[in-house]
Image (spheres, helix red, strand yellow):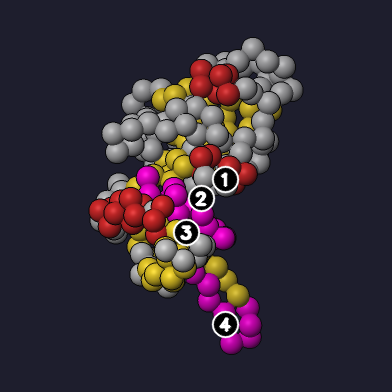
Amino acid sequence: MPLNTILANSEAVSIKDQKIVGQVTSRNLKISASEYLSTQAFQFTFKPNSYMRYSQNRDLLSELRVADKIQEQYLNFGVTGWQSYIKYQGNMTGGQISACQWQTASSGKNLVLGNLPSISSTAYIVKVGDFCQVGRYSYIATANVQRGSGTTVTIPVHRSLLETLASPVNAVIGEYGTTIALGGATYTGVTFPVLLNEYPIYTFVPIYNDSFIAWNGDFEAFEAIL
């Protein structure tokens, strides 16, 4: 995916995952707020560096031209050097996570995880800030959740479930687990389906027998929610 290459070579990444909120301030400076129910989509902005050599990245430019702002792409932070953003903090191993499944009882802002491993009841299944991918979409845990003694655990997350589960789905948490097919391929670890909504122009900056690729702005990607 060309966008993963841009992400891997970015100087900075900005992420917007806030609610959509309206606020009103009265004449006596009392403020009130209300939330507009929305999908709370992830938005990513990448500041690409300007030291990528043209001779080494002609295929990248070609792939970006093909995808442009029309084709869905898949951001996988685990393979780009930005793994810390989605890195798992709990106590399960990668193999144990892959054996878990999200259950059909998941709904609203609560994910239900089953097929749990035989680990200590005080071990953490997730910690606050862990990313949990259920099928196509990802959610952020808002509480520490321990294994306990039950057959399932409930994980509260930052936004409502975007797809109702008709059957259990293999778990993807942090950098572990295998996604469902996204665009005909599977990925390891949390992966975001996105569309570019800002695609900057590039300029050649000459160097000896080559050029650097300089971009006139940032790449902006918006989570593609069906």
Question: In the depicted view, which residue is nearer to us: 8 or 17?
Answer: 8
In the rendered image, which residue does mark 4 sit on?
26
Mark closest to the chain's N terminus, 1 or 4: 4
Element under disc 4: loop
What residue appears at the point 55 percent right and 34 percent down from the top-left corner? 175
In the rendered image, which residue does mark 3 sit on?
52
Type of amino acid at the residue the image marks with label 3: Met
Relative vertical location of residue 186 with respect to residue 143 in this rendering, above or below: above
Type of amino acid at the residue the image marks with label 4: Ser
Region in magenta: 1-30
Neighbour tally class for label 2: few under 14, some 14-19, many 20 plus, Cα within 10 Å: many
Instruction: Return the x and y of residue 81 as percentages of the image width and height.
Output: 57, 45
In the rendered image, which residue does mark 1 sit on?
81
Mark closest to the chain's N terminus, 2 or 1: 2
Type of amino acid at the residue the image marks with label 1: Gly
Q: Residue furthest front?
A: 209
Type of amino acid at the residue the image marks with label 2: Ala
Drawn side of residue 221 relative to residue 120, left or right: left
Mark closest to the chain's N terminus, 3 or 4: 4
Quarter of the image with the N terminus in it: top left
Element under disc 2: helix
State how far apart marks 2 and 1 are (Cα): 6 Å
Rendering quarter of residue 163: top left
Mark closest to the chain's N terminus, 3 or 1: 3
Is 198 within the magenta? no
State how far apart marks 3 and 1 are (Cα): 16 Å
**CB under 8 Å between discs 3 and 4:** no
